[in-house]
Image (tube, grey):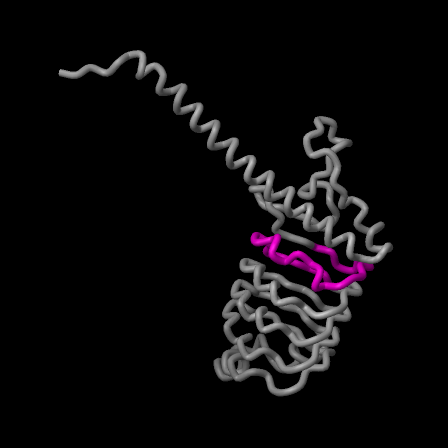
Amino acid sequence: MAFCNPTVLESLPCLFFTLLLASSNSISTGTSIAAVDQADALIKWKATLNNQSQSVLQSWILLDLNATNSSLRSEPCSNWVGISCNQRGSINEINLPSMGLQGMVNNFPFPSFPDLTRLDLTNNTFFGSVPSNIANLSVINYLDLSVNQLSGIVPSEICLLTSLKKLYLDQNHFNGSIPYGMGRLKNLTVLTMYSNNLFGFIPASLAFRYHSSGNRKFDKAQFFEPRK
């Protein structure tokens, strides 16, 4: 009959603890790297905005992340205006409504925020076209770009954001037609696109879903007339 080596048995708890600690450190390091990368992306975007925006976002500054003195640290998840994070330390909300911000929206680092569920930039002075890389916001459910000076077409890539529940694009300078693929947004309950330069018909994929089915959440007013 074979017997277990007592020395080996005694070392197992220590070995298990060592492996657990190494795994924990690895997760912590990965999260830290992600948070730093996201903060760096926001700092670079801030640098493209006008001078007034720089002062509004003065809390967005990278100091010594390794400092033990809190006055020497800048933590996006707790100290930066408009920024919220999930339990893993990854940014999941950016709320900057009516902040007087001005700049190009196509400079926004959409690919840097795979965990973003809410982006609110309403009532600022963002201009230019919305880039196709907005499709990287794969889990977003609330997107408000209304009351800005955005132009160009409504990018068809928005139709890939299948978790969207509320989408506000009103009071901009969008032109062209409403992307046909909007009908793919099965979770969408609010869509506003009024006060733009849009033309053509509401896509049948939307009209059929919200009129023929008897669901009146989407009547014509929500596309072309002000919110109540």
Give left or right: position of 11 versus 208: left
The region drawn magenta spans: 95-121
Q: For residue 68, say whether it is visible.
A: yes
Q: Is residue 110 above or below residue 37?
A: below
Q: Position of residue 156 (x, y in %)?
A: 58, 73
Which quadrant of the figure contains the C terminus?
bottom right
Name above or below for residue 30 compared with residue 122: above
User: Does the stretch in magenta take in 89?
Assistant: no
Report the residue at 63% width, 82% height from top: 177
Query: Is 212 displayed left or right of 75 in the figure?
Result: left
Q: Is residue 41 above or below residue 78?
A: below
Quadrant of the drawing holding the N terminus: top left
Q: Is residue 214 visible?
A: no
Relative depth, front residue between 228 and 169 = 169
**Image side of residue 63 versus residue 204, left or right:** right
Q: Quadrant of residue 15?
A: top left
Which image quadrant is residue 176 in?
A: bottom right
Residue drawn where x is 60% and y is 87% of the image: 201
User: Which residue does the image show at 74% across and 30% down from the upper left?
Assistant: 70
Find residue 209 and report its horizontal and vertical position in percent.
50, 79
Residue placed furthest toward the left: 1
The x and y percentages for residue 69 are 74, 27
> Which of the 4 image quadrants contains residue 95?
bottom right
Q: Nearer the viewer, residue 87 or 22?
A: 22
In this rendering, the answer to whether 58 lies above or below 215 is above
How far across and how far down the image is residue 77, in percent?
67, 43
Q: Residue at x 83, y 57 (%)?
A: 50
Residue at the far bottom in the pictured view: 200
